[in-house]
Image (spheres, rainbow, N blue to C red):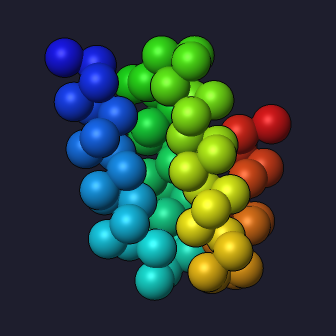
Amino acid sequence: MSRAMFEYTKTVLNKVSFDTNLFCKEVQKALQRLLPYEIEELKLFIQNLITFNPDLKQCMVYLN
């Protein structure tokens, strides 16, 4: 089930990546429901998104 949650989280983050505040809120939610190794994968996923939308970088503060 958790893998499905990770994929769902990525889908949601992609959809809200136009709005930095919404994106940050979804990152915070994801940190509460994902497993530690999934959070590491999420960091990589978000770093990739940042290359296309640098404004999202401010949300990385939640992942450190």
Residue 46 against residue 41 in the figure, above or below = below
User: Residue 48 at what x, y percent from top left?
Assistant: 62, 62
Q: Residue at x 48, y 16 (%)?
A: 35
Residue 5 against residue 18 in the figure, above or below = above
> Quadrant location of residue 9?
top left
Q: Residue at x 60, y 55 (%)?
A: 46
Residue 34 against residue 54 in the figure, above or below = above
Residue 49 against residue 27 in the figure, above or below = below
Q: How many marks?
A: 0
User: Residue 51 at what x, y percent from top left?
Assistant: 69, 74
Left or right of residue 55: residue 22 = left
User: Residue 17 at what x, y percent from top left?
Assistant: 46, 73
Q: Nearer the viewer, residue 51 or 61?
A: 51
Q: Quadrant of the C terminus?
A: top right
User: Residue 14 at what x, y percent from top left?
Assistant: 38, 66
Q: Quadrant of the N terminus?
A: top left
> Quadrant location of residue 50?
bottom right
Q: Residue at x 48, y 80 (%)?
A: 19
Q: Residue at x 39, y 25 (%)?
A: 33
Q: Nearer the viewer, residue 4 or 23?
A: 4
